[in-house]
Amino acid sequence: MKKPILLLLLLSLSYASLLWQYSTDGPVTTKPVVYQNAIITASDDGNIYAIDPATGNKKWQARAGKEPNEVFVFDGGVVASTTAGKVVKIGSTGNVIWELNLNVTDYNVSYIYGAAANLNYIFVTANNGVYSINKNGTVRAKIATYNASGVTAPLAGTDYVAYGKGNEFIKSTETGQVQWRTSLSEGSFWLSRPVLEGGVIYIGALDNKIHAYVASNGLEMWSARARNWVVGSPLVLSGAVYFGSNDGGVYAVDSGSGVVKWVARTALAVQSQPEAGMMGGQEVIFIGSTDKSVYAISQDTGDIIWKGGSEGSVASPLFYQSEIVFGAADGKISAYSTERACSITTPGEAEVVGLKEVIVSGRYASEAGDAKVMIQVNGGDWLEANASESGWVYYLNPKTSLNAGLNTISCKIVDAGGEEVGPTFTTVAINHDPSMALSNLVITVSPAILEDTAFTVYVNDADDGSPVDRFKLTVAGKEYSGDKNVTVTISEPGDYDVAISKMGFNDASKKVTVNASGVNPLFVILGVLLIAVVLSQVWSRFLSKRFAKKK
């Protein structure tokens, strides 16, 4: 049981520039919205919370009922639906303007899957049908009747509503007249909410795909496949569709063709909706994962710029006033700064390292510029890493820098506008095992070495064949340093030992022969081969026959 416990501990240590947190008494699974300059979100404790984005202090809370699953702004107030069958509208001070209970004899709603609104009406998808609700909280009409256990939250268009039910996707008018319906060949729709952009409806499904339908007629334009269910809602932005999958991937596909642009990987299933924003002056998407982290991912490349932590699965985030705000299954609402950030891509969380040099590397972003990346090991002094446009790197000697067992490595940004001040920073935890055996080196030398002529020495790791960086080579009384390979010139012919040393490896050597420049060993070899061929021909044509006759 030690390994799972250690893994949970290591995953829980990934934090960044946390600004504030507010704790509720239940999981927070809804996407926050902005209303009256406050962050509004709901908790499974049954309450709607209004949080000051600057301080994290609560402005008000209002009772909605068991397990709110939706919060959105409508007609001057905040509307929330609950899985238990209630729809509530709340005012700017937390006052309840109206409350509609559909879990009564007249409607018999036992479960609400979601709600959405256009300018005039609220639409609710429930276990027994779709309801249209007036601005005053009265039921306008039941516009669809069914008995289903798997229905998506609705998409509320200007004069229509669309939703998934089982393996069907349906678009109808506000009064319930079906305009079109289409079906999946396998799987079904479930938690992914349909999204409209540019006359196309995008939605994920349990067939491991995201689908694009023409809103006017239901024609499927394309589908793009992931490696597991797509239960999160997509984000459509600037010609790309971003979405997560239960395979742990975050995907960007072309909105017109569905061709995959990039895939970023998280540790566990991604079931939240992406949010567009800025991180350190770079355009990113923010997305939550069930691995207890929120990610900032480059919109263009899919590079993970930053990762912030939580103590529970992270719900759909909100980008607001240079903050990224999200709820999580641990009941907390968290806000992180987006002015500057760093990520640690190597070593990985929970990675076990031995005596080899530890390469600490990652990405960084800075809004103010003139950024320095600093790292800290086990709470010690901050040390400056080598930073470039492509990222940053720092090399650690495990013998002198790490303790046996658990170690933490943190990074922070110092730039022209200031620095990350904590109290927590982007951190990974690794396990150092000093008893691991030294690895071996493989040395390969280019053939036909001549005096005063450069030749190349290649150095690889015998464990996996990967090239070795930052090694030291000694030959003919001279020292060289190399990354993957090094070019050497020896001025005198003779036999030499090429010696290689590298942290975490056994020393290795290889004998090489340097030939005089007047005699190219290749020519010698070719000459010998040519003579052998001539002798063979002479023997086969003349001598062999003569000896045969004598017998």
Image: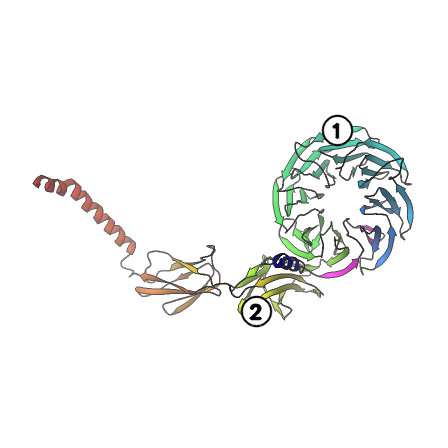
Q: Is disc 1 placed on a helix, strand or loop?
A: strand
Q: Quadrant of the C terminus?
A: top left
Residue 362 is drawn in which quadrant?
bottom right
* Residue 475 visible to the viewer: yes
Q: Is disc 2 placed on a helix, strand or loop?
A: helix
Between 24 and 123, the one nearer to me in the picture: 24
Identify residue type, mark 1.
Trp
Residue at the image position 71 percent from the left and 47 percent from the top: 274
Number of other residues with Cα within 10 Å of mark 2, as a class: few under 14, some 14 to 19, many 20 or more:
few
* Disc ID at residue 401: 2
Residue at the image position 24 percent from the left and 51 percent from the top: 527
Residue 139, position in %: x, y?
Answer: 89, 36
* Disc ID at residue 445: none
Image: 213 above or below 250: above
Q: Is residue 55 left or right of residue 520?
A: right
Q: Which residues are magenta?
A: 11-39
Residue at the image position 73 percent from the left and 34 percent from the top: 166
Residue 238 is drawn in which quadrant?
top right
- Residue of label 1: 180
Identify residue type, mark 2.
Ser
* Residue 257 visible to the viewer: no
Mark 1 against mark 2, which lies toward the viewer? 2
Image: 109 above or below 363: above
